[in-house]
Amino acid sequence: MMPKVSVILPNFNHAPYLEQRLESIFSQTFQDYELILLDDLSTDNSVEILSRYARDPRVSHFVVNDANSGSSFRQWGKGLSLATGKYVWIAESDDFADPSLLEHLVSAMEQQDDITLAYCRINRVRGDGSFEEICQWGEAIDPSRWDHDFVCSGTEAIQKYLQYRNTIVNASAVLFRRERAIPFMDEIGSYRYCGDWLFWILMLTHGNMAYVSRPLSYFRRYESATSLRNVRSTITHRFVEYQRVLERVAGLLPPGCSSQLEQYEWIVREWMSKRKAMSLWQYLVRTPLQGPLKTLFYLTLWHQWRTK
């Protein structure tokens, strides 16, 4: 009999966090799942740790790549190709979960037949192990929206929130329908940084979204995390991906749907914060910001110069 949920754990060099992550999966109150362990050719002792847990009968697959894939989203695709569950949980290897996460998210998914994904509020884990409850990207757009559980259409979620920023900041907080995800894996596999943002948008063109206001996922943020690396060679690539997502979502919006340019100021501010990591030519002329974002960037620079 096929499991209700396929849990995919894609790992790369997160040995210090694996035991806590795996124990938080095995201790879930909802137990109708299979666990798929994937390692992207780690150079630490991740494989040794994963091998111990792979003996558990709930583990259906344990795959170690022969070469690094170069993108965690390609690992998502590999996991989906092995998964058999109705729903999928991407349990990122450096996060961990409340024991009731799956129970709450499965219940949220089954409120309606047309819910394509459900996600919960998160706790952000600091470097010292303490944590704080956050929903910062969503609250930047609508401060009161995230205080209570709700279900909304995918169209509403895209037009009000996801076209502006990735309000679903933690993949480990999401449960989604496997069958609806499969067609998008090749496309998001071409991303290194923003594949999750695009994935939520694409999924929500095919169904509704459920939100659980209880914080059930613990999202680790630390200076060596992939999401925070500030290597000069990768800065431009990240902003190119921002631009790609915005262009892609513009093509999905209905004719006449307007956007609020000021909601993209966060991208401009982030680009401006990288000034010291690049040449003036790259910063001003070779900027990856295009179209309205480029205009907003130059207007912001002009305003700063005028107010000095």
Image (tube, rainbow, N blue to C red):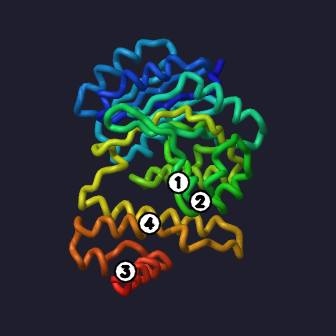
The quadrant the N terminus occupies is top right
Three-letter amino acid code at the position of disc 3: Gln
> Dot 2, crowdedness within 10 Å: few (<14), some or many (≥20)?
some
Q: Which residue is mark 4?
A: 267
Of tags 2 and 4, the one toward the viewer is 2
- x and y percent of residue 256 in the render? 71, 76
> Dot 1, crowdedness within 10 Å: few (<14), some or many (≥20)?
some
Q: Nearer the viewer, residue 108 or 253?
A: 108
Q: Is residue 95 left or right of residue 211?
A: left
The quadrant the C terminus occupies is bottom left
Q: CA distance from mark 3 to mark 2?
A: 24 Å
**Image point 43% across, 22% down: which residue?**
22
Q: CA distance from mark 4 to mark 3?
A: 16 Å
> Dot 4, crowdedness within 10 Å: few (<14), some or many (≥20)?
some
Q: Which residue is mark 3?
A: 304
Establish if 5 lies above or below 90: above
Three-letter amino acid code at the position of disc 1: Trp
